Image: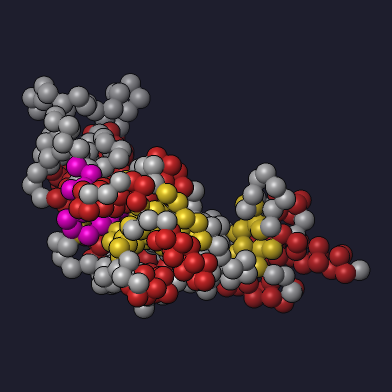
């Protein structure tokens, strides 16, 4: 895994160079596009700071990144300059983070993890429908009970069957017996095709599903399945901490990934990344998108080029080495919290390669959880868990304050 770190002035000149290759609504004869620059009463383009602000300049120029640019030349060329930046971003993610061979994948910057996950379900559903001539009733989506709600949302939208697998309440691991039984029951009920969502970190716990156990069972039974990896939380942290893992494109069992941009990566909202092996995007080509050159393959349609540019800028300003250091700092801080909780005898769940510490609710008062804005697993019923997510704003000082208050609560309980 390696991508080069650029200095801020290198980044700036690359972004401005790519903007200069885009069509410019201010200076060129552009009569046909239903787009324009941003409203100039609010977004005036003569502000002097803009020449040093590549992201804001891209935002104001307002390039549309509609479509999927890794598919070759068949896409809109008005904004070819910033499309190249998006392609470099997708290349870094696919080839450097997830070990894809060059040109063996497609991808784009989606509006969110929800879109990227639904895109994956949509593609794999249509793959089965088109290649095997089956109905939606014959296809089921398999996911653990700790899975993000975007998967059940997608199952609903796409009229698929859902199979939820139980997890061990302490280790948060998928119960393999339950998995095997439910797959066998589904086979008996005539379901022959499976889309399996595997979490490369769940949202509530930071737990990582055991992909090898899951796929070896499916391979053993010669089951028709496709694996989508939901890395919408862990995509930019887990692979940097645990370098020898099975979550990459050299694992033949994996078909697609959704990965975080607007969580760990600290990019503005609207920046999840969707990656899939080549030859799959075609299953969701909307041929009716007649006015879009190269057609559309995404759920969202038009999307801001500024989103792709800023994710690229973040990855480039750190480089792979800097990003790894940054992620280790968060994980170390999470480990520090765990050491202190151990000393106090407080029960919690934590995956060693992630920055989430999920505390058993019996060990904490509602007041304390509320004071520190810990997030419960349920807002409707009495929570079982409260989680701490060690993001960059969670500094040692606030951690120390929290730990000393939870310690006082423990002592006053005993006395
Ligand atoms: C946050 C999250 C999502 C959804 O992402 P949005 O960008 O909010 O749509 C999906 N999966 C996981 C694991 C997440 O943590």
Residue 252 lies, in percent from the top left, at 26, 70
Residue at 36 percent of width and 78 percent of height: 244
> Residue 174 vs residue 381: left or right?
left
Quarter assignment of residue 403? bottom right
Tell me which residue sits at (69%, 70%) in the image.
Answer: 347
| Residue 203 appears left or right of 71 | right
- Answer whether residue 281 is magenta in the image: yes
Residue 340, given in percent of the width and then of the height, sits at: 68, 73
Toward the viewer: 59 or 44?
A: 59
Vertical position of residue 192 compared to residue 68: above or below: below
Say if 322 sits above or below 375 in the image. Answer: below
State the count of labels.
Answer: 0
Instruction: Indicate the quadrant where residue 409 lies.
Output: bottom right
Which residue occupies 77% across, 67% down?
Answer: 407
Let me know if residue 4 appears in the view: no
Looking at the picture, how far across and down is residue 69, in whole percent?
17, 47
Q: x and y percent of residue 269 in the render? A: 41, 44
Residue bounds of the magenta highlight = 272-285
- The answer to whether 391 is drawn above or below residue 411 in the figure is above
Identity of the residue drawn at 53% across and 57% down: 145
Nearest the eye: 148 or 64: 148
């Amino acid at each position: 895994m390696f991508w080069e770190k650029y200095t801020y002035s290198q980044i700036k000149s690359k972004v401005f160079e790519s903007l200069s290759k885009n069509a410019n609504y201010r200076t060129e004869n552009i009569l046909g596009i239903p787009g324009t620059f941003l409203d100039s009463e609010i977004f005036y383009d003569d502000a002097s700071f803009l020449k040093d602000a590549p992201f804001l300049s891209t935002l104001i120029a307002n390039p549309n990144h509609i479509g999927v640019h890794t598919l070759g030349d068949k896409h809109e060329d008005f904004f070819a300059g910033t499309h190249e930046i998006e392609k470099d971003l997708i290349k870094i993610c696919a080839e450097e983070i997830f070990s894809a061979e060059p040109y063996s994948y497609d991808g784009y910057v989606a509006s969110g993890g929800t879109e990227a996950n639904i895109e994956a379900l949509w593609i794999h559903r249509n793959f089965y429908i088109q290649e095997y001539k089956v109905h939606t009733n014959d296809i089921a989506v398999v996911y653990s009970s700790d899975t993000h709600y975007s998967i059940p949302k997608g199952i609903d939208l796409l009229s698929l069957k859902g199979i939820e697998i139980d997890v061990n309440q302490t280790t948060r691991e998928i119960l393999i017996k339950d998995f095997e039984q439910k797959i066998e029951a589904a086979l008996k009920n005539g379901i022959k095709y499976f889309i399996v969502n595997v979490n490369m970190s769940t949202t509530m716990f930071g737990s990582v599903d055991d992909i090898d156990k899951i796929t070896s069972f499916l391979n053993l039974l010669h089951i028709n399945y496709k694996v989508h990896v939901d890395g919408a939380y862990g995509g930019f942290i887990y692979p940097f901490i645990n370098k020898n893992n099975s979550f990459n494109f050299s694992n033949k069992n994996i078909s697609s990934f959704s990965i975080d941009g607007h969580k760990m990566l600290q990019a503005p909202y609207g920046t999840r990344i969707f990656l899939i092996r080549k030859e799959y995007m075609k299953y969701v080509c909307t041929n009716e998108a007649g006015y879009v050159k190269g057609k559309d393959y995404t759920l969202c349609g038009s999307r801001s080029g500024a989103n792709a540019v800023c994710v690229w800028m973040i990855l480039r300003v750190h480089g792979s080495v800097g990003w790894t250091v940054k992620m280790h700092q968060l994980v170390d801080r999470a480990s520090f919290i765990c050491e202190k909780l151990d000393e106090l005898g407080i029960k919690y769940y934590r995956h060693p390669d992630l920055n989430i510490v999920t505390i058993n609710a019996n060990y904490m008062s509602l007041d304390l959880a509320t004071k520190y804005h810990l997030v419960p697993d349920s807002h409707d019923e009495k929570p079982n868990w409260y989680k701490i997510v060690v993001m960059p704003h969670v500094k040692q000082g606030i951690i120390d304050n929290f730990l000393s208050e939870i310690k006082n609560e423990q002592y006053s309980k005993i006395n």
